[in-house]
Image (cartoon, rainbow, N blue to C red):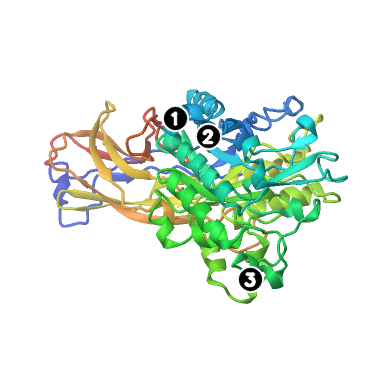
Amino acid sequence: MKALVTVVCAVALVSGCGGKSNPGPLSAMVSPPIPPSVQDISNPLRGQYEDLLIPLFPQGNLAQQRYPAWPASYDASMRISWRQLQPVDPRTLPPDAPDDRKFDFSAIDDALNKVGNRNMRLTLRVLAYNSCCSDTYPDNTNIAIPDWMRPASISYPAPTNGPAPGVTQVVPNWNDPGYLSAFADLLAALGRRYDRDERLSVFEFSGYGDASENNIDYLRDVLKAPGPSADDSVAKLGYYSQFGDQSITADSVRRLVAANVGAFPHTQLVVTPDNPEIVRELLADDVTKKLSAPVGLRANCLGAQAPLPTWAESADSHYVKSDDSLVNALKQRMTSALVISEWCRMPSGTDPRAYYEKALHDVIRYHVSMTSSANFPDRDATSAMDPKLYSLWAQANASAGYQYSADAQPGSQSLDGKTATISVAWTNYGSAAASEHWSPGYKLVDFSGTVVRSLPAAVDLKALVHDDSSPSRDEPVPASSTESVHVDLTGLAPGHYTLRASVEWQQHKPDASHTVNYVPMALARDGRDGSGLYPVATLDIPRGATT
């Protein structure tokens, strides 16, 4: 819908006429926002992503053809074992052997090439142990470390319960100096090869715990090999561990943190926050200063567990009871940094509606940016998903991450000398703010489509997020900021112009080995042109006007 300015005194356009207030030549163009309940807005590092390179839902499941295909994602993730990356004992190679001889990067290279060809980027995690869930285990042995690293591991007898009964579990000794040194060498090599590759958007903190998720729950519960008790934890680990789910010491944590941070200073890091000491180290200011962005978070079990770990949320937690500043620091980080989630299989006896409702509420409450394409109950179902459940699932995905719009405010226009001004409101309708470097701005475009002026925007998109602790909200609370846009009319030829808003992607790495370029951000409104610009106002200068 377009409103035109009526000019009474064309010759005196830029200075008003007859002493009356002149609103000037700018006029707002109203475009209602597109809510998450109606449409998912595809943008980098938000919404549903191809977890483990698994196609998006619902189109990835033939039984769900009643539902429209989900908009294409910009993101995918992969995990790879240390065993696959470094099968050859480095001690058998010359000291000056190149990385290509020491490591097998082929699987990562292949994944990066494939996602790059689809205009996507990759999230990467390296595993040293993974309790779940291979189809087969050679020699009835579950091992993710290279054979030459076995002296730094413990082999647990085959459990009779769990996901792999009858399979011996080979678990690294997380505090072994040889293990830590060799894993640090692996991380350094990965950093040398991929840290400046723009196709790699995120590296997940790796090197400790089951699936590099910074806990040993499976060892505690199934292998009967818990970490120190709460009473013994400070003496044995160097920090308080309440639930017997940790065995890495504070000294080993510092070594592993230094290795991850040192390897990927130009790549977004995220961490599964199950270990409080790892979180404390990674959230420290001195670590943040070494990185291109603050460390984000990786949350497991969407739909079954809250993204915030028990140690940071439970009223019975030592860290909560003692009012440890780490708890608030973690909560604040969730509002300001990237939060990637993964669905968790629905616990036995759980009502499906309650499961998807919890996921939706947690996406909003904990500012989840990304939701995975796998691991929820209907992912591989052989019958169509219940429409009511699909609606909840879709709302959780569409609400995740940022969803911005820019709209000029009707009646806000004014004229001061040769400067026309109008107010533009930027609003985020999503659960989280954008975590990457996006540059908002405006362009004045003439009737032929030529950009004649470029104007900067002052809005801080990263600040547009509503910090809401409500546990049961069905849609995010919008967060807005309004700024004045000033257009200098000097030298503009008579004619019809549009003022258009855009947000440019500028998340580039210095001296990039491979580059990625994205079109301007898709906004939650109509009117996008072929250059990714959105009209927010018209500007009409009649013939004979003095500019």
Query: What residue did someone put label 1 on?
Result: 97
Can residue 136 be seen? Answer: no
Q: Amino acid at mark 3?
A: Ala
- Nearest the viewer among 142 and 212 is 142
- Nearest the viewer among 377 and 424 is 377
Query: What residue did someone put label 2 on?
Result: 90
Q: Position of residue 98 (x, y in %)?
A: 43, 29
Q: Position of residue 450 (x, y in %)?
A: 25, 28
Identify which residue is drawn at 64% across, 76% down. Answer: 321
In the picture, measured across the screen, residue 440 lies left or right of residue 91, that is: left
How far apart marks 2 and 1 lie (CA) works out to 9 Å
Q: Which mark, by number, is residue 235?
A: 3
Pair 2/3: label in front: 2
Q: Does residue 476 lie above or below 94 as drawn?
A: below
Sequence-first tag of 1 and 3: 1
How far apart marks 2 and 3 lie (CA) works out to 35 Å
Q: Quadrant of the C terminus?
A: top left
Q: Which mark, by number, is residue 112?
A: none
Question: Given contact means CB atoms under 8 Å apart, are the residues at marks 1 and 3 in contact?
Answer: no
Residue 2 image-quadrant placement: top left
